[in-house]
Image (cartoon, rainbow, N blue to C red):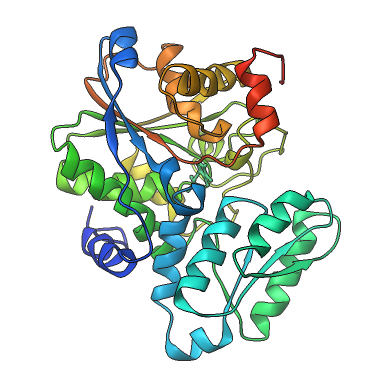
Amino acid sequence: MSEHPITLGDIYRARARIAGVVRRTPLVHSPALTAATGADVHLKLEHHQATGSFKLRGATNAVMALTEDERRQGVVGVSTGNHGRGLAQAAKAAGIPCTICMSKLVPRNKIEAIRALGAEIRIVGNSQDEAEEEARTLAAQGLVMIPPFDHADVIAGQGTVGLEIMEDMPDADTIVVPLSGGGLIAGIALAARTINPAVRVVGVTMDRGAAMHESLKAGRPVAVEEVESLADSLGGGIGLDNQFTFPLVRDLVDRTLLVTENEIADGVRHAYSVERQVVEGGAAVGISALIHRHLTDTGRTVVVMTGNNIDMDLHRRIINGEDVT
Ligand SMILES: *Cc1c(COP(=O)(O)O)cnc(C)c1O
């Protein structure tokens, strides 16, 4: 694994840097999923992380790695969701300015959630692309752009999830991870498989617009059409100029698989009704894959639950079994 530019050492350094800001999240046994699958299933409750998702880890590590000059300039990101919250909180903890760019289409409650964390919000244009253009302009003026996944410090920060898993369950056979741009799974796979090369790492994403899955099949980063999904946090491309996550996922992840919208809803429902956990669609896909038997014979299994930022009215409708797809 030495051919990759990020190492286990980087992940340990990340952990030391982010320790004061980021929570160590619990790993708990799931008797119900164990009974249902025949595997020995544990849940990594990363949706209990501050700001509601693991994105805080990578963003905090990237912010802490800035030089004095860069800190004075501040950071900029483009996000409507978990990366925006994570970056705003990371910047606030470090006492540096943060600007988050988003389009006019972003709902007010999402804007307010990020503003409440102290970030300056720039609302520009009618698409994510226009918001990104604005962020690039600010970056050209000196702000430091922190991307959501394809960045060495972000990946090393997300990798601290993998360190915690390996400490709590050194004999894990399989780690199941929600997958979008691949920052989380790349960091976890790097940490886990450097410590124990025999551990299997599996990525799960929605079958609507699975950018990394399609890119792996094509052998290079490809663009996919973006479609609305219950797993909104898993949407978006991996970047045609992807530098880090594509090669890491290609080399370290054993398998990627897809789940349907109904399966995602079942995962959210199981998480709530059986495990007593409120998770968003993107965080439930590992459970979906297990209960719908896309994955079998996984042995000692860790399922990573990644976030809890779901509209509570939508959550209620899913729990009630309404058709929300
Ligand atoms: C960002 C995100 C993911 C996917 O992480 P990547 O690093 O982009 O693969 C999964 N779940 C939630 C809740 C997220 O916010």
Q: Quadrant of the C terminus?
A: top right
Q: Name the residue: 60% across, 33% down.
A: 231
Q: Indicate left or right for 78 with 106 as reference.
A: left
Could you say where residue 188 lies in the image, as x and y percent from the top left? 32, 46
Q: Quadrant of residue 323?
A: top right
**What is the count of numbered marks?**
0
Could you say where residue 83 lies in the image, as x and y percent from the top left? 56, 56
Q: Name the residue: 70% across, 30% down.
A: 313
In the rendered image, the vertical position of residue 12 relative to residue 28, given as above or below = below
Q: Name the residue: 28% across, 31% down.
A: 28
In the rendered image, the vertical position of residue 27 relative to residue 288, given as above or below = below
- Residue closest to the eye, 102 or 121: 121
In the rendered image, the vertical position of residue 295 relative to residue 241, given as above or below = above
Q: Is residue 79 visible?
A: no
Q: Name the residue: 34% across, 65% down.
A: 18
Could you say where residue 78 lies in the image, as x and y percent from the top left? 66, 62
Q: Is residue 225 visible?
A: yes
- Residue closest to the eye, 314 or 62: 314
In the rendered image, the vertical position of residue 267 relative to residue 193, given as above or below = above
Q: Indicate left or right for 251 with 73 as reference.
A: left
Q: Quadrant of residue 6?
A: bottom left
Could you say where residue 259 lies in the image, as x and y percent from the top left? 54, 22
- Residue closest to the eye, 252 or 196: 196
